[in-house]
Image (cartoon, grey):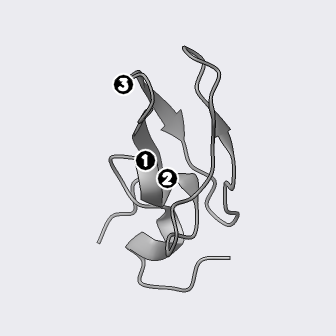
Amino acid sequence: MEIKLASIMTCPNCGYKKEESMPINACTYFYICENCSIKLSPKDGDCCVFCSYGSTQCPPVQASKNCC
């Protein structure tokens, strides 16, 4: 299985989308939308913002490993 390292983040506040690179071995706990400046954090039960708002889950989750 190929691990994807990019994810399209979608802001739940304004709908803005932007492709972002994901770190291989670190969680991203906060993300600031460059369109509306809202600060996003993971939803309950998710390990990072990519798992909550991205088109692709973070690399550790893709590899079926524990994230952070």
Q: Which residue is mark 2?
A: 50
Q: Position of residue 15 (x, y in %)?
A: 36, 25
Residues at badges 3 and 1 in contact (C-beta under 8 Å)? no
Task: Please rate how many residues cluster around mark 1, counting C-alpha atoms within 10 Å: few if below 14, some from 14 to 19, many from 20.
Answer: many
Q: Position of residue 3 (x, y in %)?
A: 40, 62
In the picture provided, is 67 more to the left or to the right than 18?
Answer: right
Residues at badges 2 and 1 in contact (C-beta under 8 Å)? yes
Mark 3 or mark 1: name the one nearer the start of the chain. Answer: 3
Mark 2 or mark 3: name the one nearer the start of the chain. Answer: 3
Query: What's under tag 1, amino acid-wise?
Result: Tyr
In the picture provided, is 43 more to the left or to the right than 24?
Answer: left
Which element is circle 2 on? helix
Farthest top residue in view = 35
- For the point 49% across and 76% down, which residue is it? 45
Q: Which residue is mark 1?
A: 53
Nearer the observer, 25 or 55: 55
Q: Quadrant of the C terminus?
A: bottom right
Q: Position of residue 29 (x, y in %)?
A: 69, 56
Query: What's under tag 3, amino acid-wise?
Result: Gly
Q: Is residue 61 above or below residue 15?
A: below
- For the point 41% across and 60% down, which residue is it? 57
Asked which quadrant contains residue 39, the reply is top right
Q: Nearer the viewer, mark 2 or mark 1?
A: 1
Q: Which residue is mark 3?
A: 15
Query: What's under tag 2, amino acid-wise?
Result: Phe
Nearer the observer, 47 or 26: 47
- For the point 52% across and 70% down, which residue is it? 44
Which element is circle 3 on? loop
In the picture provided, is 20 more to the left or to the right than 34?
Answer: left
Q: Is residue 58 above or below residue 31?
A: below
